[in-house]
Amino acid sequence: MAIERTLIIVKPDAVNRGLAGKIISRFEEKGLKIVGLKMAWLTKDVLAEHYAHLKGKPFFPGLVEFMSSSPVVLGVLEGRNAVEVVRLMCGVTDANKAAAGTIRGDFSMSTSCNVIHASDSLDTANKEIARFFRPDELFNYDLNSLKYLYAPDELGR
Ligand code: IDP
Ligand code: MG
């Protein structure tokens, strides 16, 4: 399993409920490296692109309205198998069905206002990172804890 990067968005419900720090902490505690982090107010245009796979669904207009209702926090997380690890940490889309211990399972009861977005595949992650972050907003640096996070043979680079 290679070192991957994935995109997260702390959604408006989480920002407004004061959960942004707590949610980002979970990823740090897990051992994921933050290589990009910023706040932005997403436009309806970029959201239509980001949620293009849902265009035509009855909840689509409400989703775009919700996601553009306040600033969000965007992050790029790096780690071994990061795309799958972060999705597992978030839990399933319908937060009522998300397992306790996952972010959605612990912080939301909604299918729509489910506190966090995470890329669903490596291909999607690459596209989403490029959608929201310029190259100079992403950082390559050594995490001092790296040698305690993985065994030497697990580091594929
Ligand atoms: P994901 O966020 O778990 O990847 P997607 O199917 O990609 O789920 O949907 C994107 C977002 O659209 C969800 O996180 C949620 O905010 C919203 N959404 C998805 N399905 C529904 C629904 O059935 N009703 C209302 N909102 C939904
Ligand atoms: Mg999705």
Image: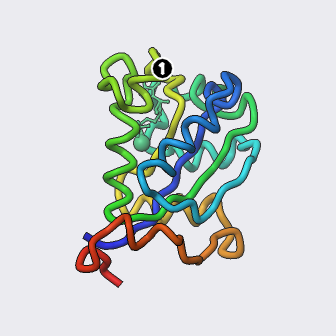
Q: Residue at x 30, y 20 (%)?
A: 97
Q: Residue at x 44, y 28 (%)?
A: 57
User: Is residue 9 found left or right of 56 in the rendered image?
Assistant: right
Q: Nearer the viewer, residue 92 or 77?
A: 77
| Residue that mark 1 sits on | 108
**Above or below — where is 141 with respect to 6?**
below
Q: Where is residue 45 drawn, in percent x and y?
A: 68, 46
Outermost residue on the bottom side: it is 157
Three-letter code for the amino acid on which mark 1 is drawn: Ser
Q: Where is residue 70 drawn, in percent x and y?
A: 75, 31
**Above or below — where is 115 with respect to 150?**
above
User: Is residue 128 found left or right of 37 in the rendered image?
Assistant: left
Q: Where is residue 39 drawn, in percent x and y?
A: 74, 47
Quadrant where the C terminus sits is bottom left
Using the rendered view, name the quadrant where residue 102 is placed: top left
Quadrant where the N terminus sits is bottom left
Q: Residue at x 59, y 23 (%)?
A: 62
**Above or below — where is 45 with respect to 128?**
above
User: Is residue 138 found left or right of 150 in the rendered image?
Assistant: right
Q: How is the image coloured?
A: rainbow
Q: Nearer the viewer, residue 3 or 56?
A: 3
Crowding near pointer 1: few (<14 within 10 Å), some, many (20+)? some
Q: Which quarter is ligand 2 in?
A: top left
Mark 1: secondary structure: loop
User: Is residue 17 found left or right of 22 in the rendered image?
Assistant: right
Q: Nearer the viewer, residue 12 or 43?
A: 12
